[in-house]
Image: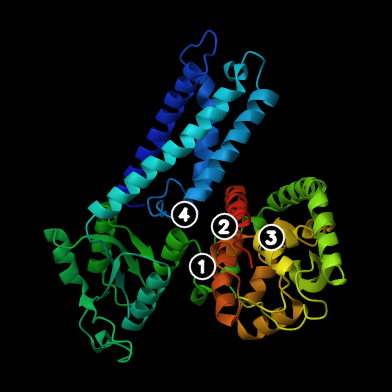
């Protein structure tokens, strides 16, 4: 993490704690709580709940776009979750002399105030850092073709920084690989280094192509020095994982699985704990969702007389096929034909379009979770016909079957519905990141962001 990013994270953390103390005490005063004293120790649980919820939606990452409507809605959902967690602790787990038990109104009023305040100063700080940081650059040290691909990827991911291609020496490899693309010609690294030392070039990070064999001991030493001076050097794969939270497919090979990470494969306790959580939450979910599913099924049945539910063969853990259950959203007889659903697809019924947008059509999959075919969170369960094609076209596609498919997942919330092979490749990068970096923190983050998707009708 860059020094300025660490500073922003620290400032936000201090502000959040200060706001919890200020707002809760002010709310207690306004509500006229009897024997009101300054609250400090009693605010540890709500402060931890607030910090944890904001952390799960990347609210402490300087690169999170806190001006976006998407982040604002996620922030509101996170604070609402923290409110529920605080209420649960206060009235279920806390001792009878816990001071916040005197008024539910204080807790609710405080979190609604915190919802606006914590989002407000985040937007101000983000705006200030974006406008006041000057033009910052990313230096890509590698061959011109890789630099062009990296520049294109940065553009797709919405990066504002300018990418400067750099080379160690002035060999013929410095010529652009494709004249049609017309990328900026690479610059010599020692020239860029001189500008950085002179203060005329502001660099946020240096990205190193892993197969670059031209690094001399002197250049390596300079990179180490820059790293400890606050200009970090990332391998290209590490940059993908840290900044974009996915894994570039060019790095995947048959030995990729044996690298660090993969807690699921190496710690069976993780998988057993996850399975236990799936059973409990899926059972509760089915009880809560049963009325909604029944009403939706009745509406589907009355609308066209066709079946209310749709089943299809999908591929699960270790490539084992199973029959998935969903509410039918397409016209009878047309829901098992074309491979992909396109925007405005005529096969989707009017009611089915709403079911898809709200993700209600996926509620019956909780039954698949209970039966052990799926998990609540994991890669999307793909149609067996598509899997056969993908495994022919995409090397190492089978790695995504190392874990159970999920109703929601990292790829589903970070990338829109896949409608072609290229979309499948992009989503696979996120699936592989999830498989490698599985954690309960990541699962909790996915849950909060999935709620955002459901509330704002972003499904398809």
Q: Residue at horizontal 76%, vertical 61%?
A: 374
The 10 Å Cα crowd at callout 3, few under 14, some 14 to 19, many 20 or more, is many
Label 1: element kind = loop
Label 4: element kind = helix
Kindly report the distance in space between the C-alpha atoms of the residues bearing marks 1 and 3. 27 Å
| Residue behind mark 2 | 437
Pointers 1 and 4 in contact (C-beta within 8 Å): no
Kindly report the distance in space between the C-alpha atoms of the residues bearing marks 2 and 3. 26 Å
| Residue behind mark 4 | 69
Q: Residue at horizontal 70%, vertical 60%?
A: 407
2 or 3: tag closer to the N-terminus: 3
What label sits on residue 359 in the rendered view? Answer: 3
3 or 4: tag closer to the N-terminus: 4
Compared across the picture, whether 256 is left or right of 315 comes to left
Pointers 2 and 3 in contact (C-beta within 8 Å): no
Q: Is residue 30 above or below residue 206?
A: above
């Amino acid at each position: 993490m860059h020094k300025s990013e660490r500073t922003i994270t620290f400032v936000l953390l201090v502000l959040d704690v200060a706001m919890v103390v200020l707002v809760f005490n002010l709310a207690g005063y306004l509500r006229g709580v009897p024997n009101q004293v300054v609250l400090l120790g009693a605010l540890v649980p709500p402060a931890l709940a607030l910090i944890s919820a904001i952390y799960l939606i990347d609210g402490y990452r300087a690169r999170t776009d806190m001006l976006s409507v998407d982040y604002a809605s996620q922030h509101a959902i996170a604070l609402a979750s923290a409110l529920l967690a605080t209420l649960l602790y206060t009235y279920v787990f806390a001792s009878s002399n816990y001071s916040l038990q005197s008024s539910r109104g204080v807790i609710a009023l405080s979190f609604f105030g915190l919802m606006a305040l914590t989002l407000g100063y985040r937007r101000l700080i983000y705006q200030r850092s974006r406008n006041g940081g000057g033009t910052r650059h990313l230096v890509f040290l590698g061959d011109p073709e890789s630099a062009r691909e990296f520049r294109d990827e940065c553009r797709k991911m919405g990066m504002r920084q300018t990418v400067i291609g750099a080379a160690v020496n002035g060999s013929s490899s410095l010529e652009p690989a494709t004249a049609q693309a017309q990328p900026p010609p690479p610059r010599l690294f020692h020239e860029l280094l001189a500008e950085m030392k002179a203060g005329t070039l502001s660099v946020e990070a240096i990205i190193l192509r892993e197969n670059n064999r031209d690094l001399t001991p002197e250049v390596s030493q300079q990179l180490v020095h820059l790293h400890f001076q606050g200009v970090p050097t990332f391998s290209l794969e590490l940059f993908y994982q840290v900044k974009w939270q996915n894994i570039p497919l060019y790095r995947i090979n048959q030995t990729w699985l044996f690298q660090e990470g993969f807690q699921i494969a190496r710690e069976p306790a993780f998988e057993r704990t996850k399975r236990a959580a799936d059973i409990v939450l899926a059972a509760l979910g089915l009880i809560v969702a049963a009325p909604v599913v029944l009403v939706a099924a009745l509406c589907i049945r009355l609308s066209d007389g066709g079946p209310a539910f749709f089943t299809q063969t999908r591929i699960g853990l270790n490539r084992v096929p199973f029959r998935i259950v969903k509410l039918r959203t397409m016209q009878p007889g047309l829901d098992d034909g074309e491979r992909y659903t396109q925007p405005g697809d005529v096969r989707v019924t009017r009611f089915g379009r709403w079911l898809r947008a709200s993700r209600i059509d996926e509620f019956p999959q909780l039954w698949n979770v209970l039966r052990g075919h799926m998990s609540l969170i994991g890669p999307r369960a793909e149609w067996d016909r598509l899997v056969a094609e993908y495994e022919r076209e995409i090397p190492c596609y089978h790695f995504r079957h190392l874990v159970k498919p999920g109703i929601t997942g990292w790829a589903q919330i970070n990338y829109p519905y896949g409608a072609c092979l290229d979309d499948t490749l992009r989503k696979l990068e996120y699936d592989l990141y999830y498989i490698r970096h599985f954690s309960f923190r990541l699962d909790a983050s996915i849950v909060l962001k999935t709620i955002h998707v459901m509330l704002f009708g972003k499904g398809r």
